[in-house]
Structure formats: structure tokens, C-alpha cells
Image: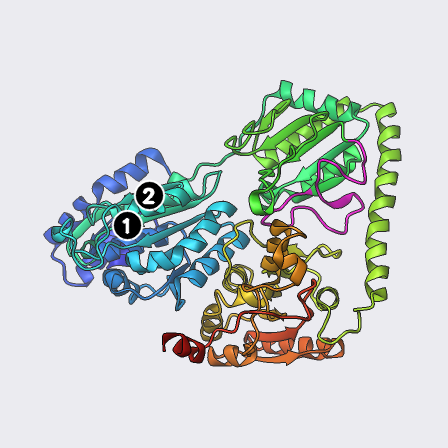
Amino acid sequence: MREWVKQYLDRELPRRKFFQQLIAVGFTAASAESVLRSFAPSAEAADITGSPISRRTVEGTGGDLLAEQLIASGVEYVFGNSGSGDAGFYDALVDRPQLKYLLVPHEGPLAAMAAGYAKASGKTAYLCVAGMVGMANFMGQLYNAYKDETNMVFVAYKREHTEDAGRGVHEEVFDQDLVTAPFTKWRWIARTSKSIPEVVRRAFKLSSTPPFGPIYLGWNYDTLLRKGVRAEIISQEGYNIPMRIRASQKDVEQAARMLLEAESPVMIAGDDLFRARAIGKAVELAELLGVPVTGTRSVFANFPRDHDLYLGGYAPNMRFPRKQDVVLNIGDRLNIGPGGMRRRPMIPSSARFVDMRVAPRWMADTLPVDIPLVADMNEGLDDLIEAVRSEMSSVHRAKIEARRQEIAGFANGLREARKVSLPRSPQWDSSPIWPARLTAELEALMEPDAYVLGGGGITFNPISGKTRIGGVGAHLGTTVGAAAGVKLAMPNKQVVCLVGDGNFLFGPHALWTMARADIPVIVVVYNNKSYNGTADRAIGLSGNGGRMGTTGHMVHYYLGDPDINFVHLASGFGVSGEKIVAPEQIAGAWNRAVEATRNGKPYLIEAEVLRRGKWAENPWYPQISLASQRTRMV
């Protein structure tokens, strides 16, 4: 019956045929006519507007309405952590297998998995968090989603019954939505069951409109259980806002002339390019102008790393080019770097600055802009490419060709130096494995179009142009869960997770979901028995004259004694794996991991790697034991 109604309202089932089917299942003629009259307003609306937008009225529980709207909003996966307050929604999922529920046994990796899916697919992720107590576990990854501008909608129900609200009952937190305020674009508590579909549509619209970001929704648990509720379910297409924004033609032409006249321009490629799937157009513009391309700390790899014009990380003072007279930013937020300690201007004050972004929030925020170009990346790049072509003269072409050859020579020299210098290092054949060798070997073994996620101090700067998905948020525990989400979004791509041991320990629970749902990811844990990145930064902050720097003694970084067995830990979650300690073991372990993923199973490789720094061979830490505490108490 429900399917017939949908087909009738979607104009797929003629009125006469629908009437005949109602009669066939026992309706009287008068009853069938009454049913048809009740659907007349929706059918007439479709006739009048001719709109492809699907609209229908659904009656059921609040959970039914939520599930139906999620389907209409294009949701395929629901990322969830068990909470009794979602009982009405779980009820609705029983009869809707098209909503695939992925259970993750902790809110941190749950959010990371949803974020990885959103980043790789471009779709808005939907996840359920177990009320305020679950949201407390979720906040670190919510911070990452905010920093990474990840499009996700999450629900953390209010545990109290609607009629008990305000009485301080079990798990009630006043102003629960405000807890999320620093990290969300929008937040809302739905007060009635009927309003749930509407706020869901609004949340998906806001999350997927640049600048992207997480949206919080909440409702008292009983609103999902309430029966006999009627509400309109509308397809999300009616609420999407295509951001096909174009900058003014005058500004585009001025930017083109500035770039053509520049002697030493530099391009910065940012995350808006990956999100808009516009990297190819950025390559076209860079080649047209013969301009070196750089990047800052970003979520994605936004330009091919093996391209002749790619130089690596951007800095206001670079070895090459030594002078920057015009800087062109294409879609980068130009955030302050790691640790928030940048004291110098991001762009040299002597350079002219052209800034193209899809959202103006961070434009002219701390940096003055000569030409701001607010534009969709595809539309904006099309316009700028056309303007450059129309303004280009033979003199420009000769200058650009000479500059391009100079840049290519420098960039290829850097790549060649890296290839040659790594094997010459005295640490190349060391055991435990030198991290740089492990990364280089894995890079060579991966499929050319692999998706690579790195976290916890693991540097992955491939020369082969593989797709990288990371993050700029600093909360640990993202990488393993995010890799599972990326694999869900890209089932036909090889997905590899490179993660430090300290980072891994913040979110190993995602391994269980990988094993349960057959999500074939290769996880490589770089185990140096330490929070090595934290040690580096702490030494840097305290200075060479500090006690840590002079003695090499640190209380906060060592993860040995007892040593953590990551292979056993993975086995406890249902994931097979092995440990390697020498370079000659890398290829064999990798082949076994690939074989496991071909059979639909995840696989973990624990690699024992070298620590670095003066504290590397002297893991000092204070000896605090229960015995010593007893002595003190006595």
C-alpha cells in the first residue's frame, strides 16, 4: 500500500490503476474515492508546478518520520553508537534496510568514521550519539570536524521525557545544545515529532553549504516514540543551494593581468579545490601561467605531488622562488600553522595578493587582499583561465615558458634528491625500522590511485600523486575511524591508514566495526613507544636551556614498559595482523595485508620504528608504583 501511494504521488502510477488496486485489496468504491481525494492536494501540486521534487505525507511514529526524511535526504549509512533514547528510530530501521546502520563502540571513532566518509564522498554524513553522556566522548572529534569544515549532521537525544524537561532528571543537562556551540554552524532542538523532518532538511542544507561544517540536532527521546504523527517528507533536492557563484568580470580580468605581468608569482592550492573536484582546472591554470604551486597545512592533497610545478609547503620566505611579487590563493583557508605560533605574516607584505574562495568568511580577516574573488572553484577557475588566455601576448608566453622550465628543473631536482638521499642515510637499514624508509617502501607498494590517511606525526608526502585525506584538527584518534569511512565512500579504491602508536590508542574501536562490516582497510601502526611529536614540541617550547632539553628526561612521552602489543589488541577486535621490526619484512607483510583486503577483511601491520631526538635511547620517566605509594602512606 505504501509503495502504491508513493508511485501515485510520484506520477508513476495512473489514477485509474491506483483505484483498481485499492478495490482489489478490499476497499469499497466509496472508500477508494475517499483515499484518492485525500491525496489530491499533493497530486495537484505536482501537476501545477511540474517540479521533480518529491513530496509526500507520511503518518507514523517520530522515528518513522526521521527515517523517511533521511532516505529522502539521500542518506545511505547511519553511523551510530547504541543509546536507549534512540529506541523509536531503531524501531523504524527494522523495516528500512536501505538505511545501513554501522555500530561503532565509542563516540570518538564513530565521529571519525562519519567524517572520513563525508570527506571522501562529498556527501553529508549522519550520525547518532548516545545523548549528552555520549556527546562528552564525541566533543574531541567534533572539534576536528569544525576545524576541517566537515559536512556532518549529528543527533544527541535529550534523555528526559518532554513532560519532565527542566526538572533535572536522569542525564538531563540544561542547554544541551549550547555545549556544542563553539564547534557547530547551527544547532536546534526539535520540540515536536512533526517538526523532525523539517529540521533534518534544514540541517542537511546548512551543513552542505559552504563553508561546510557540523550541525547538531536534538529532541527528547519520547518524540521518536510518539505514534500517529503526520508530516510532509520532501526530497533534499528542494533544499540544496548550488554555490555556482562567479566573481565580477572586472575583478577577474584585473587578476589575470596582474598574474601575467608578475615576474615571480606563486600559487597556493587549498581544500576548496578537492571538495569541488576542481583540481584539474587548477592544474590547467598553473600550466597556463607557468606558476609554482604550493600548499599549506590542509585536509586533502589538493594538487598532484608529482607535477613539474609542485614545490611542496608554502612559506612567506622560500628557497625558491626567492622573491614573490604576486600570491594567488585558490581555495585555501590560510590558517595559522601547527601550535598556533605563527608570528610572521602568512603572505609577504611586498607581494600583491589575489584570494579566490567559495566562502568569504576568512577573506581579509588578518591579511589584506588586493583582489578578492568570491567564486565557486569550477566557475571561478573557468573565468580566470579564459581571462588569462584572452590577455596573453607572445611576450607573456615567452616569459612563462622560461619560468616554467626553471620551476620544473628545481621541483624535479628536489624529488630526485629525495629518492637518492633516503637510501644513503645511515639509518636506512636499521632495525627497528627508520620511519622514512617504512613510508617510502609502503608508498612504492601501494596502488597508484590509493587513498592514504596519515596521523600522529606520520609524514606522508608522496611523489606519486596518491590521494591523501587528513585533517587540520589536533584531537588524536581520528585516523583509523576515518580510514573506515573513506573505504565506505570509495569501495573500489585501496585505502591505507598510516598511524602513530599514540594516535592509534585514542581510537582503536573502529577496528571492530571494520571486522564486523567487512571494511577492508590496511592499517599500519608506526610503533616507536612514544608520543614523539609531543616530545619534539615540548622540547621546542622549553628551549635548549630547559631541564628537558639539557637532560633528555621527560615525564610525558614514553609508551613502553610494559610494551603495548598492537597485534594482540587488533586480534581482540577481530582483525588479523602481524608485527615487523626489520626493513626486509615490509614487503611480505604488505602482500599478506593486500591478500586479506582482497578477501574483504581489514589487516593490521605493527611496525617497530626508531624514535628520534636525544631522549630516543634513554626513555626516562618517573618510577611511580603502587609499592612506592604504600611506602609513602606508611
The secondary structure type at the circle numbered 2 is: strand
Residue at image position (83%, 66%) is 423
**Residue in the foreground of this view, choosing between 84 and 2:** 84
**Residue in the foreground of this view, choosing between 382 and 192:** 192
Most frequent secondary structure within the magenta stretch: loop
Percent x, y of residue 50: 36, 36
In the image: residue 58, left or right of residue 322: left
Locate residue 111: give its quadrant: bottom left
Closer to the chain start, of discs 2 and 1, is 2
Percent x, y of residue 549: 65, 57
Q: Are marks 2 and 1 in contact (CB under 8 Å)?
A: yes
Magenta run includes residue 152: no
Q: Is residue 388 visible?
A: yes
All told, the count of numbered labels is: 2
The secondary structure type at the circle numbered 1 is: strand
- Residue that mark 1 sits on: 218
Q: Which amino acid does label 1 sit on?
A: Gly
Quarter of the rendering occupied by the C terminus: bottom left
The circle drawn on residue 187 is: 2
In the image: residue 336, left or right of residue 431: left
Residue at image position (18%, 63%) is 25
In the picture shown, does residue 399 fall above or below 297?
above
Percent x, y of residue 605: 62, 75
Percent x, y of residue 233: 29, 47
Q: Can residue 124 be seen in this view?
A: no
Part of the protein shown in magenta: 295-323
Locate residue 522: give its quadrant: bottom right
Q: What residue type is labelled 2?
A: Arg
Residue at image position (84%, 32%) is 400
Quarter of the rendering occupied by the N terminus: bottom left
